[in-house]
Image (cartoon, helix red, strand yellow):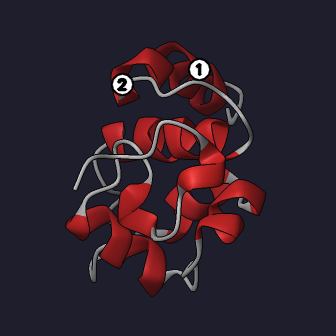
Amino acid sequence: MPKALHAEQVRTLTDIPNIGKSLAAELRGLGITTPLQVRDMEPLAAYEQLRDPMGKRHDPCVLDTFLAAHDFMNGGPSQPWWSFTARRKALLAGQH
């Protein structure tokens, strides 16, 4: 099934560009079960909540993907997750 071209077409988490089964499962684990919740989520906060059992963060590209999904669900164009790497680096730099 192809990914949605516009947010209005999204029915499930995996309809969102860049979100596959694995990241959809991660989102559901955070309590984000609908595309509308992706629209309203705070990508950095969601990423920070994702920790492995030892407390280690996921790969930073996961944050890029959350940023891409959030942007798309708020009316942005479909873009590859790596288009959000600079934004992610700025967000993480701002944490220090």
User: Left or right: where does residue 84 sit relative to residue 71?
Assistant: left
Residue tagged 2: 80
Q: Is residue 53 above or below residue 19?
A: below
Up the image or down, 68 lies above or below 40; here it is above
Residue name at image x 58 percent, y 39 percent: 6
- Measuring from the top left, give residue 54's x and y in whole percent: 27, 77
Query: Disc 2 versus disc 1: distance between alpha carbons?
Result: 13 Å
**Which of these two is toward me, 61 or 65?**
65
Q: Which amino acid lies under the numbered mark 1 shown in the image of this protein?
A: Arg
Q: Kindly indicate whether the residue at mark 1 contacts the one at mark 2 (C-beta within 8 angstroms).
A: no
Q: Is residue 26 above or below residue 90?
A: below
Closest to the observer, 71 or 86 = 71
Give the image location of residue 80, x and y in percent.
Answer: 36, 24
Which mark, by number, is residue 38?
A: none
Q: Disc 1 marks which residue?
A: 87
Front residue of this view, candidates 50 and 26: 26
**Res. 92 image quadrant:** top right
Q: Is residue 73 left or right of residue 79?
A: right
Residue 79 visible to an observer of this rendering: yes
Residue at x 39%, y 43% (from the top left corner)? 17
Question: Please, is residue 71 above or below residue 24 in the view?
Answer: above
- Residue 55 in sight: no
Q: Which x, y percent locates residue 11? A: 52, 68
x, y percent for residue 14: 35, 63
Q: How many marks?
A: 2
Residue type at tag 2: Pro
Quadrant where the image shows the C terminus:
top right
> Which element carries disc 2, helix, strand or loop?
loop
